[in-house]
């Protein structure tokens, strides 16, 4: 993904290989995660702050308290109360957390060391992998925004919608994996692969009837972001799978589903994002019910016919 890769060597192209796990950032909740946890109890004025922060994340929060208040159309004391509601000791603590997120966003496999030493025995590596992967899974599902997840399921199950999945150099694997399942459950789903001669036609056809499932992980691939933005401008719904630090696509996405990407190596992991994709597939299968079962049986029969199996 530029996602999960050594994109340090070609930032302009983005999404170039497994990206750093960000162990120095630790498992602490990001500001965006904190906002999602409390959003149901926010006052109208605090919701304005949350929207302003999300619309320009994390840069909006790096403004002064009065600057963020101006963007949100509220008072500075309201911003201070909002920050306290998120669990921060003060605005300085809030901004320090955001600055650490900015550093984590731009980390690379060359700047972060693995969690075990070069001479560590295999048993330590295996145990480290188990612990880190388990923690990433636990944190991903603990922070899963259920309302947005349900919205994603509803969009994908809508028979009037066409589903297009795409990602970056590495995260495209997740797009393809999702589509392999979705095409067995419902019609009108495909993977878009950006390539000369293919992108223009896809862009022209984008409309309100489309749902684009976008995969973009640090250090976020520019062409993936541009294509997602174009889809949004054409009226398509955008469902984003990303990391806790949030791809720029989150600024305009209709649904944002973050997943932890920690790994025992200096490269980010797709274990938790893959689990989140599989959870989405399970929810879509359950929501579609008999229609999905009938399509799956028809697909199996078609495969047998093609193979000449009686």
Image (tube, rainbow, N blue to C red):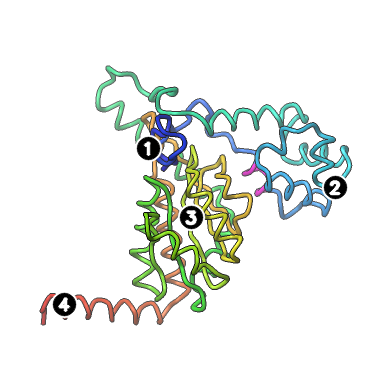
Task: Locate the C terminus by quadrant.
Answer: bottom left
Q: What is the secondary structure assignment of the residue under circle 4?
A: helix
Q: Which mark is residue 18?
A: 1
Whole-percent x, y for residue 136 in the image:
46, 41
Q: Pointer 3: what residue?
A: 214
Q: Residues within 10 Å of mark 2 (few under 14, many from 20)?
A: few
Q: What is the secondary structure assignment of the residue under circle 1?
A: loop
For the point 60% across and 66% down, which residue is it?
A: 235
Q: Residues within 10 Å of mark 3 (few under 14, many from 20)?
A: many
Q: Which mark is residue 306?
A: 4
Q: Is residue 161 above or below residue 60?
A: below
Image side of residue 175 versus residue 302, left or right: right
Marked residue nearer the N-terminal end (4 or 2)? 2
The magenta-colored residue range is 32-37
Whole-percent x, y for residue 6 in the image:
39, 33
Q: Which mark is residue 100?
A: none
Per the image, is 170 magenta?
no
Q: Is residue 240 above or below residue 57?
A: below
Residue 134 seen in this snapshot:
no
Rounded to the nearest angstrom, the CA distance separating label 3 from label 4 is 32 Å
Rounded to the nearest angstrom, the CA distance separating label 2 from label 1 is 40 Å
Marked residue nearer the N-terminal end (3 or 2)? 2
Marked residue nearer the N-terminal end (2 or 1)? 1
Circles 3 and 2, Cβ within 8 Å, touching? The answer is: no
Q: Is residue 144 above or below residue 202?
A: above
């Amino acid at each position: 993904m530029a996602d999960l890769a050594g994109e340090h060597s070609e930032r302009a192209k983005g999404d170039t290989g497994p990206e750093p796990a960000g162990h120095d950032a630790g498992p602490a909740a990001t500001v965006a995660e904190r906002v999602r946890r409390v959003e149901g109890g926010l006052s109208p004025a605090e919701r304005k702050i949350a929207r302003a922060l999300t619309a320009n994340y994390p840069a909006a929060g790096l403004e002064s308290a009065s600057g963020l208040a101006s963007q949100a159309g509220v008072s500075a004391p309201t911003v201070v109360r909002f920050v306290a509601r998120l669990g921060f000791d003060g605005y300085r603590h809030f901004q320090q957390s955001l600055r650490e997120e900015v550093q984590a966003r731009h980390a690379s496999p060359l700047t972060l060391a693995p969690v075990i030493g070069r001479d560590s025995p295999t048993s330590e590596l295996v145990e480290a992998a188990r612990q880190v992967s388990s923690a990433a899974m636990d944190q991903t599902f603990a922070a899963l925004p259920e309302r947005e997840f349900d919205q994603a399921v509803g969009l994908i199950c809508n028979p009037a919608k066409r589903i297009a999945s795409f990602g970056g150099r590495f995260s495209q694997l997740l797009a393809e994996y999702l589509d392999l399942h979705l095409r067995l459950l419902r019609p009108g789903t495909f993977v878009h692969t950006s390539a000369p001669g293919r992108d223009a036609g896809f862009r022209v056809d984008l409309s309100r009837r489309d749902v684009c499932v976008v995969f973009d992980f640090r250090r976020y691939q520019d062409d993936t972001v541009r294509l997602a933005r174009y889809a949004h401008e054409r009226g398509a719904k955008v469902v984003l799978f990303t990391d806790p630090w949030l791809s720029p696509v989150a600024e305009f996405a209709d649904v944002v589903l973050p997943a932890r990407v920690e790994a025992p190596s200096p490269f980010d992991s797709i274990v938790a994002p893959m689990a989140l994709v599989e959870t989405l597939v399970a929810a879509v299968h359950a929501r579609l019910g008999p229609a999905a079962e009938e399509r799956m049986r028809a697909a199996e029969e078609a495969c047998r016919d093609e193979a000449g199996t009686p």
